């Protein structure tokens, strides 16, 4: 709905403060303009307060979550990563993920051992070694699936956790460096744990639990590794779990 200019009679928009024809302002135009500008600024300030409050709330909640996570997170959430890689590799038949759980010198030893078991001799080239160790690992995966079921999964539970002191770390470092075929003189363990951990393999054909005592997880630089492989076919001690419960 429009209105008429009181000076020239031209049609004007209801919200217009001056006539589009004669350009004369309506009575009180300046006062109306100031009032509208004040209302606009008031709305803008309100929006800024709402947005700022929301941002601060999100920042507070995020900071609180990070703080709680920092204090709630257990050491095992960090050092068990190689164990999880080992398990995931076994379950998914992913050799690269499985072997990444070990430090490089152990990766080479394990790879050569697997290749030798397949070929009954040491392959002549690194490429042939890798082909043979992949074949061995695939056979190992199929053996687990045949025993426990193709839907098998592997879980673990830590029963005891011992943080290694400097003297104990030095013992592992000395053993590590004793592999003469490797250039390990500059390598050392900066942190480590010895665990009592139970691994359970479970599928539609059955399940079994294997307990590893004094199972080492050690850190080189910023990366954690395991030092022992887990044999999911060995005989379990009958009283191992009962004694820990």
Image (spheres, grey):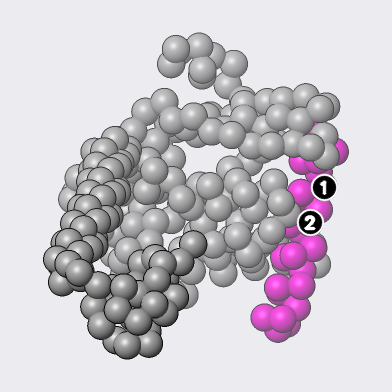
Q: x%, y% of residue 102?
A: 50, 59
Quadrant where the C terminus is found in the figure = top left
Asked if the stretch drawn in magenta spans residue 144, the answer is yes
- Specify the farthest residue to the bottom: 22
Q: Quadrant of residue 68?
A: top left
Magenta stretch: helix, strand or loop mostly: helix
Asked if the stretch drawn in magenta spans residue 245, the answer is no
Residue at disc 1, secondary structure: helix
Q: Can see residue 240?
A: yes
Tell me if 68 is positioned left or right of 215 in this view: left
Q: Which mark is residue 35?
A: none
Q: Give 19 or 55, whichever is nearer the viewer.
A: 19
Say few, some or many: other residues with alpha carbon within 10 Å of mark 2 (under 14 / 14 to 19 / 20 or more): some
Q: x%, y% of residue 77?
A: 39, 43
Q: x%, y% of residue 128?
A: 75, 78
Tell me if 9 is positioned left or right of 32 in this view: right
Which span of residues is magenta-colored? 123-148
Q: Give 16 or 225, whichever is nearer the viewer.
A: 16
For the point 82% across and 47% down, the residue is 142
Tell me if 59 is positioned left or right of 80 in this view: left
Q: x%, y% of residue 23?
A: 29, 86
Residue at mark 2: 138
For the point 48% across and 52% down, the residue is 82
Q: Give 197 or 176, whichever is nearer the viewer.
A: 197
Separation (CA) of disc 1 from disc 2: 6 Å
Q: Quadrant of residue 188?
A: bottom left
Q: Is residue 24 above or below residue 31?
A: below
For the point 31% across and 66% down, the residue is 221
Residue at mark 1: 142
The reply to whether the C-beta atoms of the residues labelled 1 and 2 are less than 8 Å apart is yes
């Amino acid at each position: 709905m429009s209105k008429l200019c009181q000076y020239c009679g031209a049609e004007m928009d209801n919200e217009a403060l001056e006539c589009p024809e004669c350009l004369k302002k309506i009575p009180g135009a300046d006062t109306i303009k100031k009032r509208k500008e004040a209302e606009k600024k008031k709305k803008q300030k309100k929006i800024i307060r709402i947005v700022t409050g929301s941002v601060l709330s999100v920042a507070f909640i995020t900071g609180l979550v990070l703080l709680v996570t920092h204090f709630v997170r257990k050491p095992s959430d960090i050092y068990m990563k190689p164990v999880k890689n080992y398990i995931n590799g076994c379950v998914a038949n992913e050799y690269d993920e499985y072997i990444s759980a070990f430090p490089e010198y152990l990766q080479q030893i394990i790879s050569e051992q697997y290749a030798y078991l397949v070929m009954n001799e040491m392959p002549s080239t690194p490429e042939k070694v890798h082909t043979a160790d992949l074949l061995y690992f695939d056979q190992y995966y199929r053996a687990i699936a045949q025993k426990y079921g193709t839907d098998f999964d592997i879980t673990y539970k830590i029963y005891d956790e011992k943080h290694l002191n400097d003297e104990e770390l030095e013992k592992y470092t000395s053993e590590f460096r004793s592999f003469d075929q490797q250039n390990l003189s500059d390598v050392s363990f900066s942190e480590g744990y010895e665990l009592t951990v139970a691994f359970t393999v479970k599928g539609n054909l059955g399940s079994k639990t294997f307990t590893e005592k004094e199972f080492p997880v050690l850190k080189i630089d910023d990366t954690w590794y395991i030092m022992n492989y887990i044999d999911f076919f060995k005989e379990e001690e009958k009283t191992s779990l009962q004694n820990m419960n």
